[in-house]
Amino acid sequence: MSSPTFDPIQVLADRFRSAIARAYPEAGDSDPLITASRQTNLGDFQSNAAMPLAKKLGVKPRDAAAAILKHLDLADLAEPLSEASIAGPGFINIRLRADTLAELVAAFDTPDLGIDKPARPQTIVVDLMGVNLAKQMHVGHIRSPFIGDAIARTLERLGHTVIRQNHVGDWGLNIAMTVMRIMDEVAAGTRSLDSLTLDDLDTAYRLAQASCQRDLAGLQACRTYGLGPKAEAECQAQVDGATEAFTRARQVLVQLQGHEPRALAVWQRIADVTMAECLAVCKRLHINVTAEHSAGESTYAAELAPMVEDLLKRGIAEESDGALVVRLDDPRYGAIKEPCLIRKSDGGFLYATTDVCAVRRRVQKIGAERIIYAIDARQNLHLRQVWGAARRAGYARHPVTGEDAMLEHAAFGAILGDDGRPFKTRTGDPVKLSDLIEQAVTAAAAIVREKSPDLSPAEHATIAETVAVAALKHADLCQERVKDYVFSFGRMISFEGNTGPYMLMAVARIKNIFRKAANEIDPDLPWPSSPLDLREPQEKQLALALLRYPGAVRAVGQSLEPHRLSQYLFELAGAFSSFYDACPVLKSEGGTRLSRLRLCSLTERVLTDGLSVLGIPTLERM
């Protein structure tokens, strides 16, 4: 069962498609090309179908337009059509009847705002985060959860069952190195597990990596250039020490794999400290990621060897220079020249091994019909290799439907500084996410105090926090996700233009209208059931904008591009601003006032709901 449409563009497209098929049966599949009119004095919408249709059929565009008009039935939707409705080379202009528009808006005014549940909801996994143990979250981490959470919220709003997954990097040799470092510090009495912080872990991670990194080039240089026995001895000592540390780290990894209590206790403490900080940041940023969404690499560890054995036994994996690979040349598996490496020549597993295993679990055990990865665009080849291997192995085939799950990459670009390079501090380090949030709150607080000096300190703090979150998230989500964008506090904190603060202000302005209506006129004005009276152009434009909401949400569900909803909400806020300036609400009388209050209420509901879908909280007042 298809969902009802309230979008006039879709309604008109269906009518035009039928008219074209009757006028020109041989071109019945032509696109009606319905768009909002650029010249509102001519109509609300226009069809541009006649020009390409005429070219295809070898007729004059205006003749094609006239033929379409002859078979077009819009009596219940639009004002009467005539040859005067044809403009220029063949544009067909349509102006909706005010009563029809009012009926559409009234039908749209439901608790679900025109978004019905699907007849058969899908089970969808969204891979929306991938923090690493013992490392601070930095600015490079925000796009994945911002975009992934917005996609997950959109699909939930559309009625699907969504399983979020935080694919935590909590296993492997790098983690074992950090565990080794902390174990040594605890044994030396210089570290207490109870007082361990993420800053401590971040430092330990870097030191552990450095201690295991052999400077073979330095040793070779000493020998090549004859730098003397002392320099060579120092370089040799570094190489020997790093070799020993690396060997010990591998031993610690074996201990972790064998669940040795002391190593496992240190690992668990590292995981607890890291995840506590990560989840606190998610909560502060209104990202719906909690402990139950964690699906770390460690949870797959016991499944990797049996899975690789299965691939080997079935002839899907083959040996190549001592390693095991899955070849993907076949178009059914992506026609990828580079095979998927699933086991190194030393027997070690890789990220790809875990990721293939993740596809298997998500489809075979969770029952995912669609898996969406909100991951950096640079990981595209890796994902295609993983998906190809999973498809070839049959791991992507749904156990109930028998169809392969949809595997999709919601790829995104980088966050850049003013210099066009990846956004970093002056020292060249990535900007810590916690520092970024504090900077945003500080910037927002200064503006809020200036705009609303009469508010209490507590109100200032609450508003500044919400404005900062809205600014950060909206600045990211209003961008086309595949593109890089330049990070600018000045732009994102502004209350003008397509920004989070501007959207919050639009919602707060409408809420203030209803406070005034209750305080100054009547708290029980019957606007929710009032007939809509759309006489003024700005009323019609606002009504038309409201009706586009279900389509905007569905567009994100299909394209996985949250900026489409962000842009729609900005346009809706703009339509409301024009309406508010031209059409007095509280100063009008009788049915006109009630009709306009109903339009205001619908606008506030759509803005609030749409921002919630993007993961952006709103405010009662500003």
Image: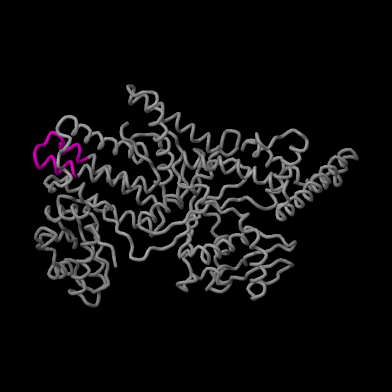
Residue at the spot x=21%, y=54% of the render? 37
Residue 460 placement (x, y as % from top left): 38, 27
Which is nearer the eye, 185 or 421?
Answer: 185
* View extreme (bottom): residue: 26
Q: Position of residue 425 (x, y in %)?
A: 56, 35
The magenta stretch spans residue 580:
yes
Where is residue 171 drawn, in percent x and y? Answer: 65, 52
Where, by quadrant of the figure, is residue 577 drawn?
top left
Horizontal side of 521 relative to 275 (left or right) equals left
Query: Outermost residue toward the right?
Result: 229
Classify 342 as above or below 515. Answer: below
Residues rendered magenta in the picture? 578-598
Front one among 163 and 595 = 163
Decide which of 285, 494 is in the foreground and name it.
285
| Most frequent secondary structure within the magenta stretch | helix
Q: Residue at 46% x, 63% y: name it.
A: 370
Q: Which residue is the extreme one toward the top?
A: 454
Q: Is residue 447 magenta-colored?
A: no
Q: Residue 60, located in which quarter of the rendered image?
A: bottom left
Report the side of 332 relative to 15 (left or right): right
Quarter placement of the C terminus: top left
- The colour style of the image is one colour
Residue 421 visible (yes or no): no
